[in-house]
Amino acid sequence: MLEVRNIEQRYGGRRVLGVPFFRVGRGERLVLLGPNGSGKSTLLRLLSLVEMPTQGEVWHDGTRVDAGNSLAIRRRFALLLQKPVFFRGTVLSNVTYGLRLRGLPSEEIKGRLDKAAALFAIGALLSRRVDQLSGGEAQRVNLARAFIIQPEILFLDEPFSALDAPTREELLLELRRIVMETGQTTVLVTHHREEAAFFGTRLAVMLGGAICQEGAVEEVFSMPATDAVARLVGVETVLAGKVTTNDGELLAVSVGSQTFFVPGDGEPGEDVLVCVRPEDVFVSRYKPEGSVRNWFEGTISDLRPYGRTLGLTLECGFRLRALVTPSAFRELSLALGAQAWAGVKATSIHLIRRGGRSSITSQL
């Protein structure tokens, strides 16, 4: 549907983006994830044809985009920014502006308006002036204004980042539902991994103006290709290790004085990174019996609340991050400075070559 080939973008001679190849598929929910300054908004502007690349090509449905056709193609897209920009007047006049600009008949405008108002629950807002809207209401109107023109691709540049958490979660939930119901091709830029995991079907992780890894959301989150990607998608424990033995079923990987057992193929002496997500760590006051192969005793050195969970740091000869519920924390009589056992299933561990390419991956 939309492709970029060997693109670079430079501002004032400084290279801020370099992408050899990237594509947006019809009907997919694509998320560009990365920290501030990673190039994700720049890539979004190039994909949406708001800007043309300094170097390289953009293709739309098999046609190369150039100065002669870019405006006509761009009008098939819709781009929403962090802060909605409205014309003076009512919600009704703003939502229908794009349709009136295109010269659609009044009956079709009314039909589309009724549908968009119902989708985004803005019927009661249509007569209100846009300067009287709350932040959440303004983004609902903004989304309705984009959907009403039935864009080929909807581009969203962190549209909910300025909203409070409850409103942001509510709008993201509604947007995902509507996009799934309508089959709307969507590209979302975000620096929140929770938004990326919830909304997307495909994920592209960006760092330093480049796409570091792309694939299905579940694949990228469970099998990050580098330590930088691992940390970005929520892997809070990344440890340097070395494969010591391979018995054909499990690798033994030494990390300092401790040993992890992980399924996979690897050679003794191979340097790897051991990646463990905090939600995959079991915490107990005593080492229990069971099938979990990896148990480490340590001291709780840090405790931080994360919404409905508590984040623990255990010093086990290495630093291991874990999540527990407040009720489990109380029931286990845990506390700062207390001794505890941390367990990790072998199949919950992901290994990465030190050079960066994912080579040994357990099945989650």
Image (cartoon, rainbow, N blue to C red):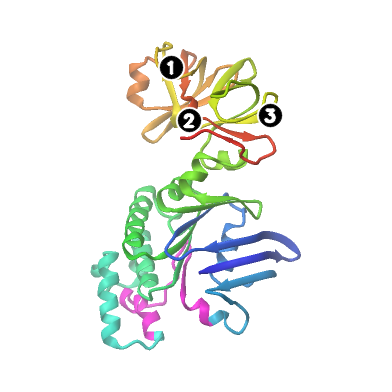
Q: Amino acid at mark 2?
A: Ser
Which marked residue is nearer to the observer: mark 2 or mark 1?
2
| Location of mark 1 (residue) | 335
Provide residue 31's location: percent of width, then percent of height. 49, 55
Q: Amino acid at mark 1?
A: Ala
211 and 266: which is toward the camera: 266
Residue 221 appears in the rendering: yes
x 31%, y 88%: residue = 105
Who comes first in sequence, dot 2 or dot 3?
3
Who comes first in sequence, dot 2 or dot 1?
1
91 and 156: which is toward the camera: 156
- Marks 2 and 1: CB-CB under 8 Å? no
Q: SS at mark 2?
A: helix
354 sits to left or right of 195: right
| Location of mark 3 (residue) | 271
Neighbourhood count class around disc 3 (C-alpha, 10 Å): few under 14, some 14–19, many 20 upward: many
| Location of mark 2 (residue) | 348
Which marked residue is nearer to the observer: mark 1 or mark 3?
3
Provide residue 300's location: percent of width, then percent of height. 50, 18
